[in-house]
Amino acid sequence: MTNNSLPEAHSQPAEGDRLEVYHTGGGCMAWRLIEPDAPGLFALVTDEGGTHIPTEPDTEDLIIGICDVQLDDPLLVLETDGRAGLCRWYVQNVGHDPDKEPDGPRPIRQLIEDVATHMLLRCVEPQDASSSGLAGS
């Protein structure tokens, strides 16, 4: 569900942006990401309190929760310190620093999408616990 009257801090997403505004209930809002290759799963991204969309995602603490539509509790939760933590996670789990790409640092919303997408896809890959590749930040 998208909301067209977003506060200025959540201005129009860039073309191709897959983060949509999602009302989780009880007055809470999050960004939600759905990955077609992870059916039945979705990612929610909130501020550190778990109740609002991050207003300064580059610098504030974030929570990315990977959820299954059939379960109440998240399958996986990443609590991290904004861009720095997302980049650490990306280096540990993907193998390179997204802020050191030839065309410059990845925009923050794209970085959030990329981390959430990797987390979603890793939840559907058959793996044992010792090789999950889901290091924290």
Image: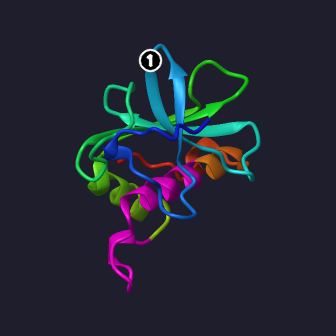
Residue 60: x %, y % from top left: 25, 43
Q: Relative to residue 29, is residue 26 depicted above or below?
A: above
Place of residue 81 in the rendered image (x, y in percent of width and height, measured from the top left): 27, 45
- Name the residue nearer the viewer: 96 or 61: 61
Q: Relative to residue 103, is residue 26 drawn left or right?
A: right
Whether residue 56 is visible here, answered yes or no, is yes
The magenta stretch spans which residues?
Answer: 96-119
Q: Which amino acid does label 1 sit on?
A: Gly
Q: Is mark 1 on a helix, strand or loop?
A: loop
Q: How many labels does the image show?
A: 1
Q: Farthest residue toward the left?
A: 59
In the figure, 93 relative to 24: above or below?
A: below
Query: For residue 109, what is the image quadrant?
Result: bottom left
Question: What residue appears at the point 48 percent right and 62 percent down from the top-left corner?
Answer: 14
Residue 23 spot, x, y in % from top left: 53, 27
The prevailing secondary structure element of the residues shown in magenta is helix
- Residue 98: percent from the left, percent from the top? 39, 70
In reply to whether residue 11 is colored magenta, the answer given is no
The residue that mark 1 highlights is: 27
Q: Residue furthest front?
A: 5
Q: Is residue 67 left or right of residue 109?
A: right
Report whether 27 appears left or right of 9: right
Quadrant in which the N terminus is drawn: top right
Whether residue 78 is visible, yes or no, is no
Front in this rendered view, residue 131 or 95: 95
